[in-house]
Amino acid sequence: MGSDAVIDIDRLMGRLFRMAEVGATDDGGVKRLALSDEDREARNLFSEWCRELGLKLHIDPLGNMFARKEGSNPGAPALLVGSHLDSQPSGGKYDGTLGVLAGLEVVQRLIDENIEHTHPVEVVNWTNEEGARFAPATTGSGYYTGEFSLDFARSLTDRNGKRFGDELDRIRYSGSSDHHKKIKACLELHIEQGPVLESENIAIGVVTGVQGIRWYEVQIRGSETHAGPTPMEMRIDPVQVLYPFLEYLYATTASHSPDARVTVGSIITEPGSINTVPGNVACTIDFRHPDGDVIQSVDKSLQHWCDEMNSERGPEILLNETWYSAPVKFHDLCMEGIEQAAMLLSLPSRRIISGAGHDSMYLARVAPTGMIFIPCRDGISHNVNEYADPKDIEAGVSVLFEAVKSLI
Amino acid sequence: MGSDAVIDIDRLMGRLFRMAEVGATDDGGVKRLALSDEDREARNLFSEWCRELGLKLHIDPLGNMFARKEGSNPGAPALLVGSHLDSQPSGGKYDGTLGVLAGLEVVQRLIDENIEHTHPVEVVNWTNEEGARFAPATTGSGYYTGEFSLDFARSLTDRNGKRFGDELDRIRYSGSSDHHKKIKACLELHIEQGPVLESENIAIGVVTGVQGIRWYEVQIRGSETHAGPTPMEMRIDPVQVLYPFLEYLYATTASHSPDARVTVGSIITEPGSINTVPGNVACTIDFRHPDGDVIQSVDKSLQHWCDEMNSERGPEILLNETWYSAPVKFHDLCMEGIEQAAMLLSLPSRRIISGAGHDSMYLARVAPTGMIFIPCRDGISHNVNEYADPKDIEAGVSVLFEAVKSLI
């Protein structure tokens, strides 16, 4: 892009690095947990930048921040562009922050270029997207879209017993009135947090939605026995059910390839001694797919497998669902807007599903919503080594700018 | 057996319950760790009983206790009958103690019945069989048979940094001189610590030897990744090597059935989070077989499987041997003596391998050695619920008595 650049990448990177000083860790990462002193400092800095641009800042009762630039019709529904400024305990500089500062850059460009538009544009910082201090995650956007009540959100507590509401009051970011819900559309720019774009050398990911996620805790109950004296045929060894179960789980996932994803993140053997047959083996399953019907059908076949196994002698296997998050599909209006913007800028793009949750997941329930992904190095995120190339950032924010223009 | 009983079961059970008061736990078990105050008290009680029977007590430099009844030829090699008085931290009343007190009962019967015999008989209490406080286990018999030096054994330390030698001196059971090694044979009565005799309703197990044991630590190295964004084909997921490895391990063991036994007691996933593909999976293997050649051949096939797997793309699997204990075969003289004694008493017997280690494992290196197993409830041992039926104890000690008589 160069001299005819759509956005000012130096200004954006300047803000990004300035923001990374807030909660900076010794190893080059960022620790900016929701409603901490660092979160307050980040919010203050963002407020200052918004003030410099003459934007009108609204803070809602859950601390969501909306910085508004009016269009020619103040009564028209607003376009929301944003993400979040909170981070993981060992987070990187880009996750969330990039999306907020990209929104700021887009608005500044609208101002600098005196671009006329009808709809208001609002740059948003959503409270507690990460959920690293207060679970559940995406609390702010969940509240805004009606998923969580104010009381529920304010009563969340962290590990030290501190309440969300008290901490929000302490950092003085609990606003007094709810924000309007007159929304034209929502856009969010984010690093991919996966390896696909980088490995395919594609600048722009047009996000089609968020995978559905089902979590399970699996319990396999056997009988604890000394490893020596008990013959194999007299054992009730849960490991003898674990490995065929895992084989079936991965094979079932493969039968829904390439979209299905399965992760067995934790396996626990009890008592966990080298010369004792475990009395109990537990494992977790994280299964993801963009199609809710597939998730249901996989659930049925896993359950069926366990029922068959339990009808035989031997260890008992129990499959307990612990969480389900339905798949989200983003809006054609937004996907097409992003795609056309990429085409306009001659940037290669592809459609891509989001593996992780984002505020846009909730926003999609109340308004046309879309996301832009840009590559990040080695797909690494939630990590101090998180990195995105300034060229990729420039491309992503330029696409965001063109997509915003096409919608307002 | 009844009125023509070979041994006095009431006297034996009286001593067993009296001994169980030493280190008794609230839940009905026994805690008598080697060289603790409770171990001293148990030794004192055993010494008192030996004195009452007029036996001559020798204590060697490692605290092994030998209580001798002379035969008609004081120069003839002695028959050793014994086991151990120390226990696991949550041990039962029978493991070890039964073998020592059975020896005492046998000798008292020889005295009471004025039975003439040529060879001396010695009832032995071996120091630190359990290894629960000071590892390695079977220290006393290992020292006696030349496996461990006195310095090595005395320098062992417990978790609190207390030295074996200091503790032995403290409880005043470090004898001044080594004991003779003129041994005719060694016999040990023990609960099976497994379910075989009980389930087959057989009173007497004629132990053929001790299984060989090989321990491994297996490491499977992949690449830690967020469960959401990374497509299956771009993952290096160690769980995808774990389950085929376990399948191969159990199948290989089954191909050496019924004698081969395998236990995967511990599986550890790192970092162990439900929505993170583990970077590393570790598991342990405890493989046992009575034949050292089989253990070698299984080792080769497991290693070969790992080599094949490592020649492909994907996670790397490493098989590290951490311990090997060669199989032990007991002596025909002893096995036949026990078998004939069972036959004489019309008690059903079968040959059986010991899954666990015992002092007899070391004694077999220096003299003809044999063991008698009796059933224990549900195969449970190393547990406060350990239990053996007095009828089974009576049968076992009677067989021991007859076997002793046939050898002296």
Image (cartoon, coloured by chain):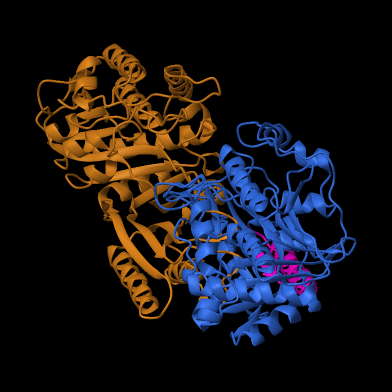
Chain colours: A blue, B orange
Query: Can residue B398 be seen in this snapshot?
Result: yes
Left or right for B391, reference B22: right
Residue A301 colored in magenta in the image? yes
Quarter the C terminus of chain A occupies: bottom right
Residue at the right extreme, as displayed: A75
Name the quadrant containing residue B255: bottom left
Q: Which residues are magenta?
A: A287-314
Query: Can residue A129 be seen in this snapshot?
Result: no
Q: Position of residue B215 (x, y in %)?
A: 34, 55
Magenta-colored segment: predominant secondary structure: helix
Q: Is residue B91 above or below residue B26?
A: below
Left or right for A292, reference A196: right
Residue at image location 27% in from the left, 39% down from the top: B136
Left or right for B167, reference A100: left
Q: Position of residue B153 (x, y in %)?
A: 18, 33
Residue at image location 56% in from the left, 71% down from the top: B230
Q: Position of residue B199 (x, y in %)?
A: 56, 49
Q: Nearer the viewer, residue B157 or A68?
A: A68
Left or right for A335, reference B391: right
Q: Nearer the viewer, residue B126 or B330?
A: B126
Q: Is residue B130 above or below residue B282?
A: above
Residue B398 colored in magenta in the image? no
Q: Position of residue B336 (x, y in %)?
A: 32, 50
Q: Is residue B278 above or below residue B66?
A: below
Name the quadrant containing residue B312: bottom left
Give the total number of marks visible in the rendering.
0
Residue at image location 80% in from the left, 40% down from the top: A152
Q: Nearer the viewer, residue A176 or B122?
A: A176
